[in-house]
Image: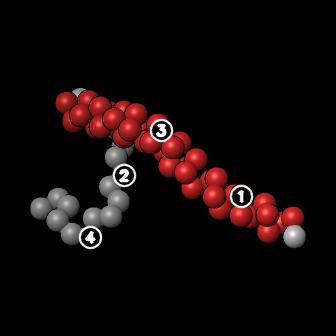
Amino acid sequence: MTMDFVNKIMNVAFPPAGLLFLSFIAPPYYFSKYICSVFRRFTSENVRGKVVLVTGASSGIGE
């Protein structure tokens, strides 16, 4: 009986709380990811003299 009550409370309270939480967390998170991706586009890492492992390529390497 008490578990049914707890489940009903959780079913009513958690979805709005989760949406409210995500509405405050998601925008800054995605904005920071966007800024990082823009920053990475204009900066490149110099790999001259380093070992680079290329994965996922089935053909076209070295042609």
Density class for disc 2 (Cα within 10 Å; few <14, some 14-19, many ≥20) is few
CB within 8 Å, label 1 to label 4: no
The residue indicated by pointer 3 is 25
Q: Name the colour scheme.
A: secondary structure
Question: Which corner quadrant holds the C terminus?
Answer: bottom left
Q: Quadrant of residue 37?
A: top left
Q: For this rendering, which residue is in front, 22 or 17?
A: 17
Residue occupying the point 27% across, 65% down: 57
For label 3, the SS is helix
Residue occupying the point 45% across, 42% down: 23
In front: mark 2 or mark 1?
1
For marks 1 and 4, the one nearer the N-term is 1
For label 2, the SS is loop
Q: Amino acid at mark 1?
A: Ile
Residue 58: mark: 4
Residue 26 appears at what percent x and percent y? 43, 42
- Rounded to the nearest angstrom, the CA distance separating label 4 from label 2 is 14 Å
The residue indicated by pointer 1 is 9
Q: Amino acid at mark 4?
A: Ser
Residue occupying the point 79% across, 63% down: 5
Residue 11 appears at what percent x and percent y? 65, 62
